[in-house]
Image (spheres, grey):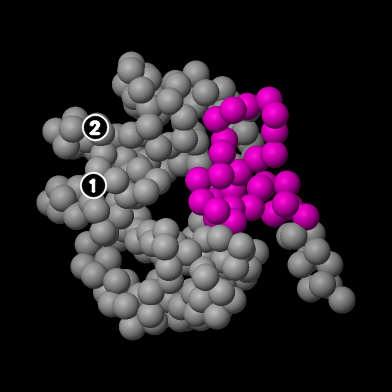
Amino acid sequence: MKCCLPIRTAEFENVRATVERYDKDFDLFEIWLDYLEGDSQAEVVSFIEESATSFLLLFRREDLSPSRTPFKERKRYIESLQRDRIVWDFDITVQEEELDFYRAESRSAGLIVSYHNYTRTPSDRDLRETVARMEQYAPDTVKLACLCENQRDALRLLLLAEELRSAGKSAVVLGMGEYGMMTRIFAEQLGSAYTFLTVLSSESEAPVATASGQLALEEKKQIDAILERMRKR
């Protein structure tokens, strides 16, 4: 499982400083390109092109509202940022246009097709139908992140994660909110391709929790240590 640090900020310098500070702690960095303002977006793109670090890139906004970056410009960035150390993430609900464009040609970057629901966890049938829709785009990984209104929602997501793992599929299945936290704790045990963490640091303003219930790197290390001791008993 790869550990990813989301960076949602308006300033290029915050991105650069955060990547340099935490490069040894994370496998890759998730950059929310649509939140960058002024010249920062172009500066970040140049930084990504020149860097040897791995990145997960998205133009999605937190509430799935329309991107502020024109589609023509988004296409230009998608075409230019094609490396084996780059992964693009497009949400099936609001970014089918990007997905159609992405799959029209062979690409060298990785592809995550995701589904985000910030209000509820759909029924098991709806979740499986969503996975089937996502798989039509031949993604490297499917990602589902849903708000859990109770423990049963979290358990259903955990069962779906196990189902996808047993089928040999690369997946990330996460619950948001207080009840969804258990899905993040057991993500690695259920074969999650990625986990998304924040950091507990007052020295950098860039890393922030981009989903409710997101664990911090320090918390994950403590949880991993506990689970390792339990395995050795």
Q: Sequence order check: which comes first, mark 2 or mark 1?
A: 2
The location of residue 95, given as percent across then percent down, is 23, 51
Magenta residues? 195-222
Where is the N terminus found, in terms of image quarters?
A: bottom right
Residue 69 is marked as 2
> In the rendered view, does 224 fall on the left or right side of 183?
right
SS class, disc 1: loop
Residue 43 is marked as none
Q: Quadrant of residue 18?
A: top right
The type of residue carrying mark 2 is Thr
Q: Which residue is mark 1?
A: 107
Q: Quadrant of residue 122?
A: bottom left
56, 204: nearer the viewer: 204
149, 37: nearer the viewer: 149
Q: Residue at x 52, y 65 (%)?
A: 175
Is 110 situated above or below 227?
above
| Residue 168 in sight | no
SS class, disc 2: loop
Where is the C terminus found, in terms of image quarters?
A: bottom right
Disc 2 to disc 1, how far (Cα)? 21 Å
Is 130 situated above or below 143?
below
